[in-house]
Amino acid sequence: MGRFRYSYVISGGSVEEVSGQIRRLAGLGYDAVELGAELPLAEASETRDLIDDAGLSVSSICPGFTAERDLSHPDPEVRENAVSYLGEVADLANAVGAPVIIVAPTAFLRTRPIASEGEEWGLAVESIRAAGEHAASLGVDLTLECWNRYGTFLLNRLEQAARLWRETGLPNGGVLADTYHMNIEERSLPEAIRTTGTLINHVHLSDSNRAAPGLGHVDYAEVLRALLDIGYPGYLTFELDAQAA
């Protein structure tokens, strides 16, 4: 599978916290890292230099979607705060050279709509469009992430994310395929990948138990074959739970 590039999710709110992780991943032969959005913009230049010196790239930025940052919430103040937050994340992505930021349309663990599901879908489209327009001005793409039903009610399957993305009308982005969430929600992981096709612009890898691929029940040979079939050009980013196995 030499056609793929590999990335790993790291976390930390300072250069000091991420520096050791960056050096370790470079030594292991990774191509890139996925950063959390908690890194201050003021430390972006130093972090980018550290990553460049290690011979790595930044594949993506992963924000945190809290109750105060909910793109589909019926309260306009909450939505405006979420859009503003994504603007800051796009600024960080631009500063560290990340081509993609991850977007989820609800707060994590909000599993029921507050208004109607249809109304919140429309609010999510509007909010993502607003955030995406700012990101586009910086040359940054969005990728819509589906969580399983225990994390959100709004986007659980790739076909839903593809439909929402098309409704935004944005040119800069697509859909994230996360094998952990897909394992819970999709009837067939390879079929979902092939159906979504070139709209997939980011991939998260973790097995059915959040451990490394091969330590759970996902058939990764079929997943990788499907990604090759659609000509997926991006990173395969490992998002693992160290306690899972």
Image: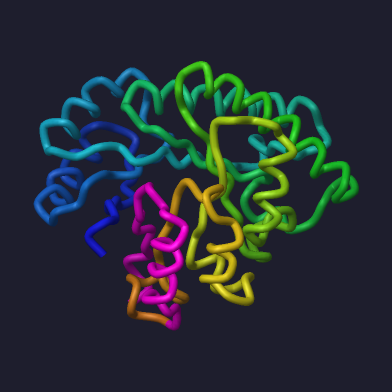
Residue 61 sits above or below residue 156 on the image: above
Locate residue 54: give its quadrant: top left
Q: How is the image coloured?
A: rainbow
Q: Quadrant of the C terminus?
A: bottom left
Q: Nearer the viewer, residue 174 or 118?
A: 174
Residue at the location (57% across, 70% down)?
Answer: 191
Q: Nearer the viewer, residue 179 or 165?
A: 165
Residue at the location (44% across, 78% down)?
Answer: 218
Residue at the farthest bottom position = 217
Q: Nearer the viewer, residue 28 or 241?
A: 28
Is 238 inside the magenta-drawn segment?
Answer: yes
Segment colored magenta: 217-245
Q: Is residue 11 left or right of residue 127?
A: left
Residue at the location (71% across, 45% down)?
Answer: 164
Residue 74 sits above or below residue 140 on the image: below
Q: Find residue 132 and report its horizontal and vertical position in percent.
A: 60, 27
Q: Is residue 202 left or right of residue 13?
A: right
Residue 220 sits above or below residue 121 on the image: below
Residue at the location (33% across, 70% down)?
Answer: 212
Q: Find residue 85 and report its horizontal and vertical position in percent.
A: 57, 27
Residue 18 sits above or below residue 84 on the image: below
Locate residue 62: give its quadrant: top left
Q: Find residue 59 and report its horizontal and vertical position in percent.
A: 34, 41
Locate residue 197: give its quadrant: bottom right
Q: Is residue 74 left or right of residue 109?
A: right
How many marks are shown on the rendered structure? 0
Q: Quadrant of the N terminus?
A: bottom left
Q: Nearer the viewer, residue 112 or 237?
A: 237
Q: Is residue 208 left or right of residue 42?
A: right
Is 79 inside the magenta-drawn segment?
Answer: no
